[in-house]
Image: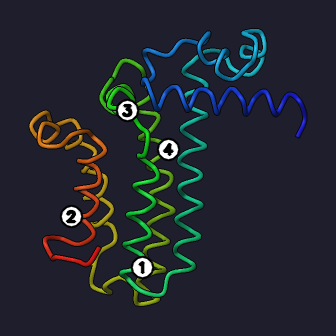
Amino acid sequence: MSKANKKYNDILEAAQKLFWKFGFKKVTIEEICREGNVSKMTFYKHFGNKTEVAKVVLERVVGGASEKFKKLKDEVQSASELMEGMLNMKKEGIHDISPEFLADFYTDKELGLKEYIGQLTQKVWVEMMEDFKELQQKGLIRKDLKIEFFMYLAHKINDYLEDPYLLSLYPGPEDLVMEFTRFFAYGMSPRNK
């Protein structure tokens, strides 16, 4: 890895760590540079502003999750393994994310990041629909389930993450995300831990 690539990655890792902890709005470019041990000149050599670095962080996170799902899809032998794997991926994906991050990225319309996440998500969802259809063919998902219906409902869950009443029922937004995920995967049926 070249020195330029290392600095680029250092910026991304620092930005992700700070965004996850404090949200987007509260983090400054100076703090990203300090955390990543890079100069502001180096930052601006790679990124025009904080929003650009946030978009690349999101691309990497979404891309990484997509790759993990593809690997999971190829390895599982049963629907329960698939659900457990998806739940574990969700837990890992939201681990260490602050409420500020969720508010900045998912509810703030001024930043333009909500729309960007929507675009990234749409692209991944098209790929995931094909993956779910493949799992259907393998017999791991009900043959009579319309995958488009499943994906539509899963996408609509994001709207509920902005609901103040639902958010008030849980210690943090990540707990609400996991509740939705478990309910979506298992309904009201009890299951062994």
In the picture of the structure, the residue carrying the numbered disc 1 is: 81
Report, in whole angstroms, how far the alpha carbon at label 4 lies from the one at label 1: 26 Å
Quarter containing the N terminus? top right
Please name the residue that numbered disc 3 is placed on: 98
Which tag, 3 or 1, sits closer to the chain's start? 1
| Element type where label 4 sits in the image | helix
- Helix, strand or loop at label 1? It is helix
**Place of residue 113 in the rendered image (x, y in percent of width and height, measured from the top left):** 44, 28
Which residue is most to the front? Answer: 193
Q: Nearer the viewer, residue 78 or 151?
A: 78
Marked residue nearer the N-terminal end (3 or 4): 3
Tag 2 residue: 183
Left or right: residue 149 compared with residue 188: right
- Give the quadrant of residue 173: top left
Q: Residue 169's spot in the image, x, y percent?
A: 12, 42
Where's residue 6, x and y in %? 81, 33
